[in-house]
């Protein structure tokens, strides 16, 4: 043991410091043991709602996540280009073979038909015109 200014020390802590620390801890424990805590007041009973019991049948509902598929899926491809005027079915509804599904704007087709009829009439008239021109 080493002595430092007349005190006996163990390691780096002196005996006086060690004894003082033990005394403070003991006093704290004794003071804490003598003090009695007041019991908190009892809580009021909880409020409970009551309903009369009725016996009856209740429907059972099931909400399940899933996917459905039709028994026959058909791919629809357009054979002509155009703007849709009407859609004659609702998504997911049943349709029959030959049923009208879409109606395309007929104006571009009518103008193409009129131009083709004009070209046809011109083509039919051209040989007669050439024949008459030749006869002159």
Image (tube, grey):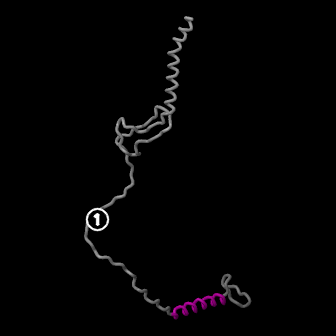
Q: Nearer the viewer, residue 16 or 115?
A: 115
Residue 70: percent from left, percent from top: 36, 43
At label 1, counting other C-alpha atoms closer than 10 Å, the crowd grade (few under 14, some 14-19, many 20 or more) is few
Q: Which residue in the structure is indicated by mark 1?
A: 58
Furthest residue in direction top, as rendered: 135
Identify the residue at horizontal 49%, vertical 30% (top origin). Answer: 110
Q: Nearer the viewer, residue 10 or 37?
A: 37
Image quarter of the N terminus: bottom right
120 up-or-down from 103: above or below? above
Identify the residue at horizontal 71%, vertical 87% (top origin). Answer: 3
- Does residue 88 appear left or right of residue 12 in this picture? left
Identify the residue at horizontal 55%, vertical 5% (top origin). Answer: 135
Furthest residue in direction bottom, as rendered: 34
Q: Check residue 27 for magenta coloring.
A: yes
Residue 119: percent from left, percent from top: 52, 20
Q: Secondary structure at mark 1?
A: loop
Q: Quadrant of residue 88?
A: top left
Image quarter of the C terminus: top right
134 up-or-down from 114: above or below? above
Q: Check residue 21 for magenta coloring.
A: yes
Q: How many marks?
A: 1
- The residue segment tinted magenta is 15-35
Residue 116: percent from left, percent from top: 51, 23
Furthest residue in direction front, as rendered: 136
Identify the residue at horizontal 50%, vertical 93% (top origin). Answer: 36
**Magenta stretch, overall SS:** helix
6 up-or-down from 85: above or below? below
47 up-or-down from 73: above or below? below
Q: Nearer the viewer, residue 132 or 96?
A: 132
């Amino acid at each position: 043991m080493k002595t430092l200014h007349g005190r006996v020390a163990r390691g780096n802590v002196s005996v006086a410091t060690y004894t003082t620390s033990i005394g403070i801890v003991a006093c704290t424990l004794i003071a804490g043991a003598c003090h009695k805590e007041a019991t908190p007041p009892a809580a009021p009973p909880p409020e409970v709602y009551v309903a009369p019991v009725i016996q009856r049948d209740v429907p059972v509902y099931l909400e399940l996540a899933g996917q459905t598929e039709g028994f026959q899926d058909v791919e629809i491809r357009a054979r002509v280009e155009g703007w849709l005027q009407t859609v004659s079915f609702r998504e997911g509804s049943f349709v029959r073979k030959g049923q009208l599904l879409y109606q395309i704007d007929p104006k571009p087709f009518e103008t193409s038909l009129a131009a083709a009829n004009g070209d046809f009439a011109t083509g039919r008239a051209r040989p007669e015109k050439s024949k008459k021109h030749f006869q002159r």
